[in-house]
Amino acid sequence: ALVLALVMSMSLVTISNADFKDADKIDYTEAVDVMNAVGVLIGDENGNFNPKENLTRAQAAKIISYLLLGNKTAEGLAGSGKFTDVAKTSWAAGFVDYCAAVGVVNGMGNGKFDPDATCTRAQAVTFLWRSEKSPAAGTANPFADVKSTAYYAGAVLWAVREDITKGTTNTTFSPDADCTRAQIVTFLWRCKK
């Protein structure tokens, strides 16, 4: 609730993407400014935002945890070892286990989460959709590469209806393409706007 309130109030944004050393590479400045200001997605230790860097599944779980709980509560999450490839002591354990417990993420089979794998566009939109309680899609499918039977079909159609994404072209979503930091921050911003 705190994150949503801050996101909705643009007057609270005091940190600018211009503060990042790689600000000239950031296209979605408003989204980056707000998500950075509320601590959902911040820069690295060198002062860069790295908009073209791929997002990992573990990072996506952290972002969603921050979004749903706020920074302080999310940072206090403890891991339970639900997945065999996410140690209880891993920085991501609490985030991954929380997201799994509330139905936002699933594993990749055989008790594994694959935390270091790149998060695809389909996974990112699905995680966000599930964090919003999987609302009905209610729109026609404009994408030739999103089959109605795909696990992410409802999420993608919801994201289109809500103007969270328009796809990579008018007729493609590119579900298996890597999701970048710029893309996830834009999806989040558009969802919470």
Image (tube, helix red, strand yellow):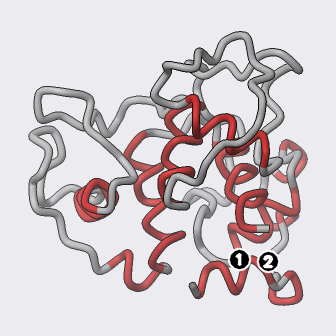
The picture quadrant where one finds residue 167 is top right
Q: Tally the marks.
A: 2
* Residue 72 to residue 60: above or below: below
Q: Residue at x 84, y 47 (%)?
A: 26
Give whichever of 147, 114 is nearer the camera. Answer: 147
Q: Position of residue 100 (x, y in %)?
A: 28, 54
Give whichever of 17, 173 is nearer the camera. Answer: 173
Q: Secondary structure at mark 2?
A: loop
* Residue 147 to residue 114: above or below: above
Question: Mark number for residue 153?
Answer: none
Q: Are marks 1 and 2 in contact (CB under 8 Å)?
A: yes
Q: Position of residue 78 (x, y in %)?
A: 19, 71
Q: Is residue 160 left or right of residue 153?
A: right
| Quadrant where the image shows the N terminus | bottom right
Q: Position of residue 106 (x, y in %)?
A: 30, 41
Please name the residue that numbered disc 1 is placed on.
37
Q: Residue at x 72, y 44 (%)?
A: 182
Give whichever of 165, 20 is nearer the camera. Answer: 165
* Residue 39 to residue 60: above or below: below
Q: Identify the amino acid type marked 2.
A: Ile
Please name the residue that numbered disc 2 is placed on.
15
